[in-house]
Amino acid sequence: MVEAVQNEWPHVQICPMESEKIDASAVHDADVLVVRTRTKIDGALLRGSSVRLVCTATIGYDHIDTAYCEANGIRWMACPGCNAQAVCDYIEEALNEVELRGTIGIVGVGHVGSLVAKMAERNGWQVLLNDPPKKIGVSLDEIAKNCDVITFHVPLDATTYHLCDASFLAQCKQGALIINAARGGVVDEQALLSSGHPFMLDTWENEPTINAEVLGNALRASMHIAGYSLEGKRNATQMCLDAIAKEGQLPSISLANYASAQTSKGDSSFGWLDKITNQLKANPSSFELLRKQYHLR
């Protein structure tokens, strides 16, 4: 993105920085802010700044105080669907590694969930869907009672916080596998731990300071990288550039004109998720460092 902006918009000043260094002082004179999930966008950060557009290069936007932005004339955008295929590929690898078959329940049938449903059907699963806002599928009770695997793909908000709680888990079939690659707060981790159900987690409550006991009992575990892929990163970057061009009445930039700086892919051979699990369990305090050093698939 830096190369594209410098070449195509020579009069635009771009200031790359690590997420932990983005504070009120750093953004005070910025017009546009481009972030990922680790940067909390709220009044404490933006008050008194020149920021008029916030772009998050992610599907989720629970790290953005959208009410504050909208009340203060600050436009914001996320990148829905940018890494949906990457998350779907992650779920497929998770299912392949445990060699399960049967009925899979997919909670949340948006960009990611719809791809997971097609993938599961292609691999011989019976699929049950649940997405009340979209009026798709069966009830959560039916998902719990009938599924051998349940995977969550919903945004995190007041209606989905601890959607997978003790009550839900008590209804699940014995031995049902729970997968969360959505947002940490969607699953009540303590209830999950107490339930005895096997589970796989990519997203965690209180990231990056994750619960060591929960991690230790996870069948598979990763550091919020399900959506990390070359394709997903490029898609999100393009969507952010399009929003900035529209906001600033600038000429459009096509990343197709720029070779990727990432020339080699990370390990995508069978068992790569098992390798990541072992790495994270051996170094739980290095969650954020491992995430930053993860080689894009």
Image (cartoon, helix red, strand yellow):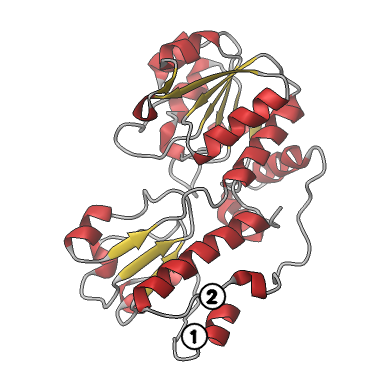
Q: Is residue 219 visible?
A: no
* 193 vs 111, nearest the viewer: 111
**Residue at disc 1, secondary structure:** loop
Residue at position x 66%, y 60% in the image: 293
Percent coordinates x, y for residue 165 in the rendering: 40, 22
Q: Residue at x 65, y 44 (%)?
A: 280
The answer to whether residue 169 is above or below residue 67 is above
* View extreme (bottom): residue: 11
Write down the quadrant of residue 7 in the picture: bottom right
Q: Nearer the viewer, residue 241 or 60?
A: 241
Q: Is residue 260 visible?
A: yes
Tell me which amino acid carries mark 1.
Answer: Trp
Mark 2 or mark 1: whose residue is earlier in sequence: 1
Secondary structure state at the residue bearing disc 2: loop
How far apart are the alpha carbons under marks 2 and 1? Answer: 9 Å
Give the total of numbered labels. 2
Q: Is residue 258 left or right of residue 271?
A: left
On the rendered structure, is 149 left or right of 43? Answer: right
Q: What residue is disc 2 on? A: 253
Q: Quadrant of the N terminus?
A: bottom right
Q: Label 1: which residue?
A: 9
Q: Residue at x 56, y 46 (%)?
A: 224
Residue 192 position (above or below residue 111): above
Choose between 9 and 219: the one closer to the eye: 9
Question: Which percent across, then down, holds residue 226?
Answer: 61, 44
Q: Are marks 2 and 1 in contact (CB under 8 Å)?
A: yes
